[in-house]
Image: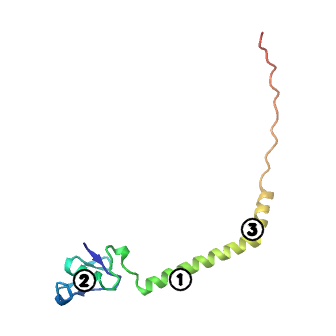
Amino acid sequence: MTIYSPRGHGAVTVPVERGGCGVTHTDTEGDRLKVDCPKCEAAIMRLPFGFGPSPESAALTPDEREAIEKGTRNKAELVSAMAAALAEKGSDIIASALDDSPKPRPRKRTPRPASTDAQ
């Protein structure tokens, strides 16, 4: 199994006495360190370094967490502002739109011809 680091890790070495192979791993995939060494993977996954079995499952960096939290706050503020504006002006906007909409014309009724069924 291959494991991936959080962004920003350039290399990792797990000493033999800590259960690793002792070799420095520097292989990357995108902007994440990729470790494909069974001995080192097992040792790294036991530690709280944020490695994961896929790039998406690796821990977020503090900068990434902050950006997500800020984006979430901004979205929540935008939704609140939109809800307040709709509550304040929404009924006026809807009424105005309904007043300005074209009214359907009444349909002309065409008389049906009388039935000529012979009995």
Quadrant of the frame with the C terminus: top right
Amino acid type for the residue under numbered disc 2: Ala
Residue wearing tag 2: 43
Circle 1 residue: 70
- State the separation of the CA atoms marked 3 and 2: 59 Å
Q: Is residue 21 visible?
A: yes
Q: Is there any visible trace of residue 37 in the rendered image?
A: no
> Is residue 52 left or right of 63 when viewed as pictured?
left
Q: Quadrant of residue 83?
A: bottom right
Identified at 53% across, 79% down, the residue is: 71
SS label for mark 2: helix
Q: Could you give the CA–CA distance between mark 1 and mark 2, rounded to whole angstroms?
A: 34 Å
Q: Are marks 1 and 3 in contact (CB under 8 Å)?
A: no
Tell me which numbered mark, 1 or 3, is placed earlier along the sequence: 1
Q: Residue at x 46, y 83 (%)?
A: 65
Residue type at mark 1 is: Lys
Q: Nearer the viewer, residue 116 or 96?
A: 116
Numbered-mark total: 3
Residue 64 relative to residue 34: left or right = right
Q: Which label was assigned to residue 90?
A: 3
Label 1: how many residues lie within 10 Å, few (<14), some (14-19) or many (20+)? Answer: few
Coordinates of residue 111 in the picture (x, y in percent): 82, 27
